[in-house]
Image (cartoon, grey):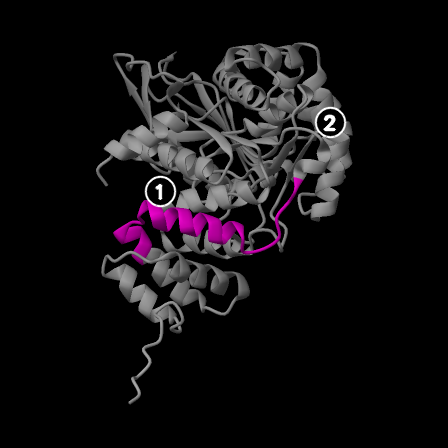
Amino acid sequence: MSTAHTPDTQDAPLHTIDLIRKKRDGHTLDAREIAFLVSGAAAGSIPLEQLSAWLMAAWLRGLSLEEIRALTLAMRDSGDKFDPSRLGKTAVDKHSTGGVGDKTSFLVAPMAAACGVAVPMISGRALGHTGGTLDKLESIPGYRTALSLAEFETVLAHCGVSIVSQTPSLVPADRVLYALRDRTGTVESPGLICASILSKKLAAGLDALVLDVKTGSGAFLSKREDAEYLAALMVSTAEAAGTRTVALLTDMGQPLGRAAGNWIEIMECLELLHGKTPAESEDLRELSLTLAGWMIFLGGKAESETKGRQLAEATLEDGSALAVFTKMVEAQGGDSGIFSDPQAFHKPGASKVVNAWETGFIAEMDTTELGWAVQRTGAGREKAGEPVDAHAGIVFHARCEDFVKKGQPMATIFATTEAQLAEPISLLRKAITIAEEPPQPVPLVGRIFTREKAEAFLRDAVR
């Protein structure tokens, strides 16, 4: 007498539509199902409309901790991985969840490298209302962000730091899903953000990672509790994958520093790399030193993050961080000659000074709206692949808590054409609130999540 054989469910074929329905109905996908979706994204075997539908289902229903870890590792393993061990240094990177005027990479990477750690930094382009590290670097004529893994290693060995884009073979699934999220309104998902960020960082073979998780009006996750959850989630996920990680919750209730755009952000960083300390860039300098201090500490070059910060500050004062940044730019084909007179290179198509429309304190900045204002100048993009204007953007002359008089310059807008000035001006006027009383000050750096704190937070979190 024979018995019918029931196939093991692990061997049963998977169908994308079933997984969309499963997530849509609030169920949890297992690691095999997640891997199927990720490999389909990387190979192009799953249509974009189905990937988009699954992303929206994941955004609406949320992802469990197990799904997030499975998604992160599947994306990490969807292509080639970089091995920095041949460099003979501890590999440490920094990543920000995105903000307006957030240009710390151009400071922390050379500071940490000048202190002896390797900084393999794989970065992204403008996403939504936030700028892109690669777009900013490509405002330097000749700078190449698209290096092969062999070229990446060569630059790292020569300079200690390299800032590049994803290669076609490195985390190919994320290139597809990242672009889809931007076009389908599914950016603001802690689980999807976590997997996207960490898959790239883990594929770079990092020994340690410092995360700058933004909160406030300009962050993708503006609510503090959501940002805290994301910070704890990323620390726990990265630590589980074997990478020592810390996350700092930092304020994005106003643009960071005074410039938001592409070349104008590089200009601001060059000033700080030259050891200058302009008051309007103090928050940028302070945050960069704090982040670099943690990188140097986790990289084993300082006995504490405080000592690391001191070492980082010394690299600004003695010019070693500037030397490293210049060396990297030259190694990747960039024309460092323009650094001698950055202002002369700045040639926007049109510009307009916006003056204060009344007297009072700057009480609030809707930084997301300011980010869209920057994007509409031509500095950002509405669709993937669109060109950006290297010289467009906004320089802010006043910040939260400042007292301004009617007619006083508030900002200078640089746009590609005269016709592109009107919308950013309108957005800026709506985004900035001037009141009779100053606002309560907000600390630049709030909660800090180490592995122990992250795991305790997630145990207590109700999601």
Q: Which residue is mark 1?
A: 190
Region in magenta? 57-83
In the image, what residue occupies the spot 53% across and 61% down?
Answer: 42
| Disc 1: CA contacts within 10 A as few (<14), some (14-19) or many (>=20) | many
| Image position, residue 449 (x, y; %) | 39, 25
- Which structural element holds mark 2? helix
| Image position, residue 110 (x, y; %) | 65, 24
User: Residue 331, which numbered label?
Assistant: none
Q: Which residue is mark 2?
A: 326
Q: Is residue 306 left or right of residue 225?
A: right
Dominant SS of magenta comes to helix
Q: Is residue 435 magenta?
A: no
Q: Where is 104 relative to 203, above or below?
A: above
In the image, what residue occupies the spot 58% across and 55% down?
Answer: 79
For this orientation, the residue located farthest to the bottom is 1
Res 271 quadrant in image: top right
Going by the numbered disc 2, the residue's amino acid type is Thr
Q: Where is 53 relative to 209, above or below?
A: below
